[in-house]
Image (spheres, rainbow, N blue to C red):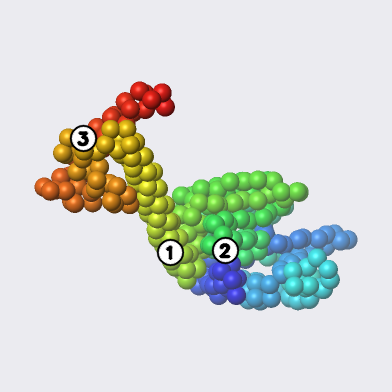
Amino acid sequence: MDFYARAKDELIRAMPERECCKISELCGLIKADGVVRIASGRMSLSIRESSAAVARKIVALLKDVSRPEVQVAVAKGRGLVRGKAYIVRLPRHDEVVRLLDVLGLSASSAAGGPDPRIVENYCCKRAFIRGVFLGSGYMSLPGKGYHLEINVETEGFAEFLSQLIGEFGVRTGIVQRRKRYVVYVKDGDDVAELLRIMEAPNALLEMENDRIVRSIRNDVNRLVNAENANLAKVVEASCRQVQDIELIDEAMGLHRLPPSLREIAMARLENPEASLTQLGAMLTPAIGKSGVNHRMRRLAQIADSLRRKKGLS
C-alpha cells in the first residue's frame, strides 16, 4: 500500500462523531461524486466511487443522517479503476429531496458550494473538506514531491473549495483540466497542514519524517558538493603553484630565492596535495594560512615576470 492509499484509508476510518460533521462530510462526498437524475419529474441520486471502502463510508453516513433506502451496485468495464466502480444509489424521490435539503444542496447551489450553514462550524469545515477529498482527491507520494489536488465539476465549486481551504491558511491554486477544475496544493507545509485539517495524523507524521530525511540528505549533498568544490580549487591552485615554482627553478634556480620563498617553494614541490594551512605547519617556524598565501603570491609574481621576459605571457 503506497502513501496515498494509506492516507486515504486513514481518512476513511476517521468517522465524525457529531451529527453536524456527519452531514458536512456526506455533503462533501456527494458534491464531489454525486449525480442527481430527474426522470418523469422524480429525482434519484447516484454516487459513483472507485473505492469499496469509501462506498461503505457513504452508506454508513447515509444511515446516520437520514436512513434512506440505499442500493449498492458494482459496475465493471474498461476505463474503470481496477476494472470496477461502486455505485451507491438512492432511488426514492421523497428521500432524495429530504436528503438534499438536510445537506444544503438545493438546485441553486449545484454550481457552487452548499448552504453556508453546512460549513458554519470549524469542525464541519474540516469534515466537508475531508469528504470532498475522499470523493475526488489525489495526493502524490512524498518522495516524488508534494502535491495534493481535488478534481471538481464546476468553476464555482472550485472557487468555493479554494476559499474554504484558504480559511485555514493553506494556499491553493485552480487550473482547468479538460472540462473539470482542479484545486491543488503544492507547497510541503500547505500539504502537511491540509492533512492535519482532514485528520490524518499518521499520514502527516509519515510525511514529516520523509521531509526530515529529505532535508538531511539535501544538507549532506550540499556539504559534499561544497567540499568537492573546495578540493577542486585546492588542486587547481596547487597545480598553478607547482608550475610557477618549476618555471622559477628552470629560469633562475630556487637557490636564488629569499630563504622564506625558497622554503615554501620546496615544501610545495614535496607536498603538491597539501592545503595552505598544512604547508604552513610544515615550515620552521610554522606560519598561518595567510602567511603561506602571501609567499605564494610573491612566487606567482616572480613567475609572471619571468614569463613576460620570455614572451610567454
Residue 213 marker: 1
What residue would you read off at disc 3? 257
Question: Which quadrant of the figure contains the N terminus?
Answer: bottom right
- Residues marked 1 and 3 touching at CB (< 8 Å): no
Q: Is residue 283 above or below residue 127?
A: above
Please state the horizontal and vertical placement of residue 36, each as a whole percent of the image.
Answer: 77, 60
Q: Is residue 204 above or below residue 53?
A: above
Asked whether, in this view, residue 208 is left or right of residue 53, the answer is: left
Q: Residues within 10 Å of mark 1 (few under 14, many from 20)?
A: few
The residue at 73%/75% (across/down) is 70
Q: Is residue 135 above or below residue 290?
A: below
What residue would you read off at disc 2? 141
Q: Is residue 213 above or below residue 272?
A: below
Quadrant of res 62: bottom right
The residue at 83%/59% (across/down) is 38
Instruction: Check disc 1 and report its element: helix, strand or loop.
Output: helix
For badge 2, the amino acid type reads Leu
Quadrant of res 76: bottom right
- Residues marked 3 and 2 touching at CB (< 8 Å): no
Q: Nearer the viewer, residue 50 or 187?
A: 187
